[in-house]
Amino acid sequence: MAAAQSRRLPRAVREQQMLDAAVRVFSRQGFHATSVDEIAEAAGISKPMVYAYLGSKEELFTACLHREGARLMQALADAAQPVDAGEALGTDERLWRALRAFLRFVAAHRDGWGVLYRQARGQEPFAAVLADLRGQMVEVVAGMFAAGAAPGADIGMAAQVLVGAAEAVADWLADHPDEDPDDAAERLMSVAWLGTQATLRGDRWTS
Amino acid sequence: MAAAQSRRLPRAVREQQMLDAAVRVFSRQGFHATSVDEIAEAAGISKPMVYAYLGSKEELFTACLHREGARLMQALADAAQPVDAGEALGTDERLWRALRAFLRFVAAHRDGWGVLYRQARGQEPFAAVLADLRGQMVEVVAGMFAAGAAPGADIGMAAQVLVGAAEAVADWLADHPDEDPDDAAERLMSVAWLGTQATLRGDRWTS
């Protein structure tokens, strides 16, 4: 039991080191131009060891996406808590915190997550991993909106618009390293919140 | 002169046929799995002829993106005209028409443009073509918003949010063949317009 434990711990640590190296190499060179040899070298581990731990290049890239995606979702979920220090937060405050957390994450991972994200978006089977992640984000946002929304309010569309807009701003932020993510989040919130608020009241625009 | 003209016309027609075939094959199989042989076969033209007309597989894919992108921009520009039948249109009416045109285009090209778009998004040098197209869309939308906006209004962010939200809805529409693009455009407009309107007035949300 103790022996199994001690073997398990280094494995987990080593896997994280491999993933760190893989994220660096993939985001610098792109999926197609990267070889498992280069990742092994960057991680200071033999190539057969990389295969044994994390599988093929494709599985390695998928593992990178899953880990980085899970970190992003964790940051979002932490930021969007309904209660902070015993105080219930309004939907706008929660949305603002979630947007800020999202854009801070993207800004802090410009070389890693941002690049992986763009590479994965257009390529199966990775695009499916991102579509799933995107679905989770829409769900988190829709959950926030559901509290206090009018019956029949178009929560699904409001959440979709929010996530799409946030992704567009994240993309822009990834290309503009001098921009401040908190400022971008506040500008995004300015544009997005009033429309969202009207939608949650049940308002509809008609042609 | 007449001879040059008659040779030029068939070339243009043949190029369009090649591009039609290329869009079909690329969107069914993906860029990487497609060979120029297959495109030549689908177009009923010899492979050397395809190379002579449109160049390498990469150039062929870029030509597909340019043509489909130009069609989309044309549809958008037509829809967003400031005057219709002698009547000046309000910004909301123009935005609504542009969103509807965009989503109709995507819905009508589910198998073509939508798939190319997703493939290109994550891969250089194609991603640069899309970033350029996206920049054009943001410019068209910002131009619409500039008419009558308050001094200092955050037109750039409002346009970016709009385009990002529209792309997200287009993505969703591409996966939901039973959804009606006009209905999706109206739901998107409902969420997006009120926030945009406040932004153009110069309102800002502050934390």
Image: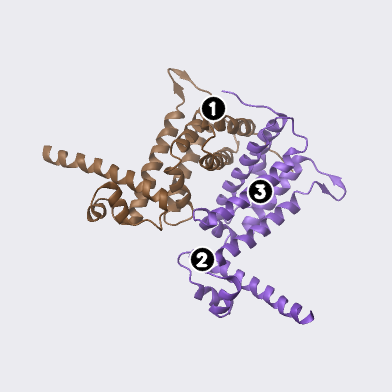
Chain colours: A brown, B purple
Q: Disc 2 marks which residue?
A: B28
Q: Residues within 10 Å of mark 3 (few under 14, many from 20)?
A: many
C-alpha span from label 3 to label 1: 31 Å
> Quarter of the image containing the C terminus of chain A?
top right
Coordinates of residue A73 in the picture (x, y in percent): 42, 37
Q: Is residue A32 left or right of residue A157?
A: left
In the image shown, does B18 or B52 lie closer to the viewer? B52
Q: Output the chain of dot 3.
A: B
Q: Residues within 10 Å of mark 2 (few under 14, many from 20)?
A: some
C-alpha span from label 2 to label 3: 27 Å
Residue at 61% x, 69% y is B19
Cβ atoms under marks 2 and 1 closer than 8 Å: no
Numbered badge on residue B137: 3
Residue at 56% x, 39% y is A169
Identify the secondary structure beneath mark 1: helix
Q: Is residue B104 visible?
A: yes
Q: Disc 1 marks which residue?
A: A91
Amino acid carrying label 2: it is Arg
In the image shown, does A106 or B28 lie closer to the viewer? A106
Identify the secondary structure beneath mark 2: helix
Do the dots labelled 2 and 1 sit on one chain?
no
Tell us which disc is closer to us: 2 or 3. Answer: 3
Q: Is residue B84 left or right of residue A134?
A: right
Coordinates of residue A176 in the picture (x, y in percent): 54, 39
- Where is residue B189, by image quadrant? top right
Q: Is residue A150 visible?
A: no
